[in-house]
Image (spheres, grey):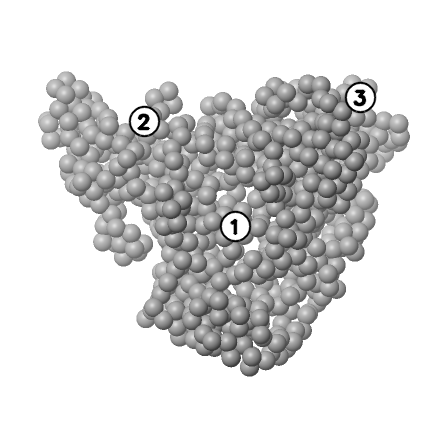
Amino acid sequence: MVNVVQLDRRRLFKTTGLIGGALVLGVQPSLGSAAPATMASALTLFVSIASDGSVTIASHRAEMGQGISTSTPQMIADELEADWDKVEVVLAPGNSGFGDQSTGGSASIREYYEDIRRAGAVVREMLKQAAAQQWGVAVSEVAAKDHAVVHKASGKTLGFGELAAKAAKLPVPDAESVKLKNPADFKYIGKDFGIRFQDQIVTGRAKYAQDIQREGMLVASIERPPVVLGKVKSFDASEAKKVPGVVDVVRLKDRGVPMNTRPVGGVAVLATNTWAAHEGRKKLKVTWDLGPNASHNTDSYTQELIDGVEKQGIAVRAAGDVYAHKYDAANTVEATYVVPYHHHMMMETPSATAWLEGDKCVVWTGSQTPQWGQALICQELGWDPKKDTGRVEFNQVLMGGAFGRKGKNDFAIEAVELTKATGKPVKVVWTREDDVKHGFYHSIAANYFKAEVTPKKSADFWVQRVLHPQISWIFNPESDQPDTGNLSQNFADLPFQLDNLSCETNKVKTHLRIGWFRAVQNIHNAFARGCFVDELAEKAGISTAQMWYNLIGEDRTVDPGAEGFEGWSNYGQNPKPQYALKTARMKHVLREVLRLSGAEKTVADNEGWGIAYATSFNSYVAAATKVRVVGKKLTVLEMHTAIDTGTVITPDRVKSQMEGAMIMGLSLAISEITVRDGAVVQGNFHDYPVARMPQVPPLHAHIIASDEAPGGVGEPGLPPVLPSLVNAIYHASGRRIRHMPVTRELEV
């Protein structure tokens, strides 16, 4: 259940630093059987109305370009019947009072859709009650409209500002009993609005982490160990200290395992300005103890993954008996696919500013996990992370992209370590090279498939395996195989109707910091599955779309947990019936992308279409890509995605995410992170390229109308893009690429 409570203005300011108006309500999330004491400390956001009628909404999730600071107020303003021009948004600081502030997993709307709407509905009802009392009429005789409450019979009106103080004296109604609007009456939900902070962003007035200034502040540039778990043996800072502006050189503490998301150590050069800090760092002379991961090389590691995935592994879901079957070679397809390490490459590199102020620590940064950051900072300072998080003032700013990288707070902890060491405010600034060489990477992966085409042009005796280094390794160095969460992402959640199936994994060591990355394990799993379905279709002599339909089978609800995949949670939504996997939606999205793209039409010589499909984060997405291949030259001609994400809040934001996913998918196709002697080879856009404007074709994002519960948007667009591209290359040239990137074989 969801609860809405009235907040005391003074306490709100004291605990969060945010100022409320005459009426301030906080929303408590749906916490199931959680005790009331727990619920009272978990406010996801607040809605405030001032005496001048202005409405302020605190968004509990971070804004990194995805548009949550626009979509959240849209939902509240719609139920409230507010005037959009009188609604303002503030970014909530890191504070346990705002509940779960982790911005990731494409969850901000799909997990809180009704809760957020109820916030607006409760405020609306309280304003109506206040007006009805003032006029001495029944609440049923009044209605909220255009930022005011209207008496239906007389036409009298009272503005929200006039009613706010009176409403604040009323009891807060039970949120579950408040009636939500009929979707047919939505005024803002489903409509496009310019994103919040857009004017500041395009005019350069928006404040990002590197814009933070503090009197007496030092800027830090850090030379970090080139190999994960490496340490400083010795260093010479004499030349660095000669650079004008350099005031100090500090060795950061060594850190062992578990690494968590803490810094990796190194030597920091501190200066009065950014240029001096970076120049001084160039003159450092550091001798390293490279540690246990210095032998890691991507060539040999890739072969280790391939060898591991091509032998029978640990079954996590099974049906029938694939190993008792004798495969018919003429009708069998067997393939291994490889996706390399990848890096987030967000435009804004990490940065954080910190200082100690009395008995508290003040931090300014952009983080996807501010409360986790608070807890880690408490540990860094020797404070109790359960009792003292209030001593860490964690201020949020806009982020220039993140894609999961800024869910790790190592850069903020570096600033805290250095401000403690120097006694001065410190801003840590990462260069692009720092970002690329010391990131949390998307895991390199190998996927193996084997299946036999049936007389009915489907497939059976399906074996699939996946092997990749673990995100969990940074928390547990003994972690050596994909966990249920990893395997739930377009792997063992297979929606196909198969009589004989074995989904397997195996064990492997991890050598780099692996982290959350847009769409996470869906990237390599959906790539491999999407390509394999295309290969099966070729073997069966039918279209790729028809093979998808045949494999998916009859219209039904799929429950991988009931079919043997223990621990499947459907991205945290199991067993909610509104998020059940429906094969009819899968097939519909495939049909729509074909219809809207024209992918089934005849193409010219050397041209081809590729399609693919993936369900992720409770959304259904299909992709279609058209390419031309002449010799070794690949030209991408057009790209399409179609998404059924249920109820859409802001269509333009959905389209933007889909367009971004197509560009990012194309970027993943032409880039890779490689490792030599434990160190990342790449360092900037010249050797880890992202798609440039001349390489990006016309992009078409199609939203499928749906009144289903809202699914995720930020990540689901990416998984089917890469296989649609590779399949298109095959249909244009006959060249089957199984080992990414495509630039191993083609020029783009």
Outermost residue on the bottom side: it is 238
Answer few, some or many: residues within 10 Å of disc 2's Cα (few below 14, many 20 plus, some between 14 and 19). Answer: few
Q: Mark 2 or mark 3, which is nearer to you?
A: 3
Tag 1: amino acid: Met
Q: Which residue is nearer to you in this view: 566 or 74?
A: 74
Disc 3 secondary structure class? loop
Q: Please give the label number shown on residue 99.
A: none
Tag 2: amino acid: Lys
Which image quadrant: the N terminus? top left
Q: Which residue is nearer to you in this view: 36 or 601?
A: 601
Which image quadrant: the C terminus? top right
Disc 2 secondary structure class? loop
The part of the image, by quadrant, that contains residue 141 is top left
The residue labelled by disc 2 is 179
Q: Mark 1 or mark 2, which is nearer to you?
A: 1
Left or right: 460 in relation to 468: right
Residue at image x 48%, y 70%? 276
Tag 3: amino acid: Gly
Q: Residue 359: percent from the left, percent from the top? A: 34, 69
Mark closest to the chain's N terminus, 1 or 2: 2
Q: Which residue is nearer to you in this view: 323 or 64?
A: 64
Circles 1 and 2, Cβ within 8 Å, touching? The answer is no
Residue at image x 47%, y 56%? 372
Q: Is residue 457 above or below residue 193?
A: above
Residue at image x 69%, y 23%? 545
Left or right: 117 in relation to 599: left
The residue labelled by disc 1 is 347
